[in-house]
């Protein structure tokens, strides 16, 4: 199960094509950055790969296994949504116990950011604290491919830096596809970048290509 | 099961309250529970906290399985209360 192969993804809403015959390939040990303007379909693409959003057509394969729905992707693909997904009214410790197996649980329970929060409930935590717990849950799950949709939402710069280093440290064991509204976060983390525009996915080799595509300005790049 | 915990307590409380108000027999509580739990599931998860589904999706549980679990628990509860 060393690669994630996404092919022929087409999706349209009300006759507007959001994704057009999208192809994406990610290997274990690789961090693929997915960028694009707001509303370009980045989250939709990740949800289709994960299996929670229906596509007009799709082909997702991990290793030799074709993933047709959410259940097929169990322990193979996990997805971090943009907004918080932790259930409330239950302690963080219990949520970790229910979500992770023995081996991975220990690492998260002993994490410096998580340890002081174990007996608290979601409603008593800040957005940044919730986010780091969610990221650690997802990246320490059994899944071999991790889809991170705007993981740095509401996270302070110091925690952001910690997460970037943490993912880089663990990247050999899993494959990652990451999106973020701040493209610098993606550039810092990703081994390769793909840009989604008008439903088509384009491989980015030089940052200057993003100027030509109208994603950033020349001044932004110099800054 | 974590997912059912919220549905169970809220639905049971409402079913019992309704049965007490209309002075219905305990068998009817099972029927009320079955109906109310469907609405509680819809309200708590599909309307109020739809993003919480992702916790369960990441564990390989899809919406169909979660809805079936709500219905099965309601049915078991109904059968137990009918037999007593």
Image (spheres, grey):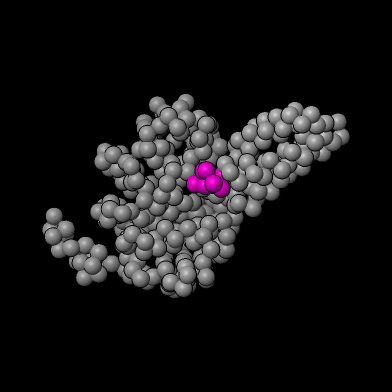
Q: Main secondary structure of the magenta part?
A: helix
- Residue visible at 60% across and 51% down in the picture: B63
- Residue visible at 33% across and 42% down in the picture: A154
The part of the chain drawn in magenta is: B45-51
- Residue visible at 64% across and 53% down in the picture: B64
Against B64, residue A137 (above or below) is: above
- Residue visible at 45% across and 32% down in the picture: A123
Q: How far from the left and from the top, in percent, is residue A110?
A: 42, 31
Q: Residue A162: in sight, yes or no? A: no
**Magenta segment: does it hold B47?**
yes
Q: Nearer the viewer, residue A16 or B68?
A: A16
**Magenta segment: does it hold A86?**
no
Image side of residue B61 versus residue A133, left or right:
right
Q: How far from the left and from the top, in percent, is residue A151?
A: 37, 48
Q: Nearer the viewer, residue B47 or A102?
A: B47
Q: Image quadrant for the C terminus of chain B?
A: top right
Against B26, residue A6 (above or below) is: below
Q: Residue A147: in sight, yes or no? A: yes
Q: Image quadrant for the N terminus of chain B?
A: top right
Q: Nearer the viewer, residue A18 or A7?
A: A18
- Considering every residue shown, the one lying at the far front of the view is B22
Q: How far from the left and from the top, in percent, is residue B47?
A: 54, 46
- Considering every residue shown, the one lying at the far right of the view is B83
Q: Quadrant of residue A212?
A: bottom left
Q: How far from the left and from the top, in percent, is residue A106?
A: 47, 33
Callout count: 0
Image side of residue B2 versus residue A184, left or right:
right
Q: Quadrant of residue B27?
A: top right
């Amino acid at each position: 199960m060393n690669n994630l192969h996404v092919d022929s993804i087409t999706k349209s809403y009300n006759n507007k094509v959001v994704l057009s015959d999208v192809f994406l390939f990610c290997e274990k040990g690789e961090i693929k950055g997915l960028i694009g303007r707001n509303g370009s379909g980045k989250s939709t693409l990740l949800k289709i790969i994960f299996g929670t959003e229906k596509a007009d057509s799709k082909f997702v394969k991990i290793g030799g296994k074709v993933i047709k729905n959410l259940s097929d992707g169990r322990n193979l693909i996990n997805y971090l949504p943009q907004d918080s997904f932790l259930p409330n009214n239950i302690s963080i410790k219990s949520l970790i116990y229910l979500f992770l197996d023995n081996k991975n649980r220990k690492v998260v329970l002993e994490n410096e950011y998580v340890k002081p929060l174990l007996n608290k409930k979601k409603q008593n935590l800040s957005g940044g604290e919730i986010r780091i717990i969610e990221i650690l849950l997802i990246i320490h799950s059994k899944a071999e491919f991790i889809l991170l949709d705007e993981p740095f939402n509401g996270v302070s710069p110091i925690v952001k830096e910690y997460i970037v280093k943490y993912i880089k440290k663990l990247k050999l064991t899993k494959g990652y596809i990451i999106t973020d509204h701040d493209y610098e976060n993606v550039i810092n983390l990703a081994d390769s970048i793909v840009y989604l525009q008008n439903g088509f996915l384009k491989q980015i080799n030089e940052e200057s290509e993003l100027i030509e595509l109208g994603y950033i300005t020349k001044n932004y790049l110099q800054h | 099961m974590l997912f059912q915990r919220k549905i169970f307590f809220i639905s049971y409380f409402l079913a019992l309250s309704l049965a007490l108000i209309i002075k219905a027999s305990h068998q009817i509580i099972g029927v009320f529970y079955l109906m109310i739990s469907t609405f509680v599931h819809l309200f708590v998860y599909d309307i109020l906290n739809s993003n919480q589904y992702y916790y369960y999706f990441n564990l390989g549980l899809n919406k169909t399985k979660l809805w079936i679990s709500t219905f099965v628990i309601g049915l078991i509860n109904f059968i137990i209360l009918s037999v007593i």
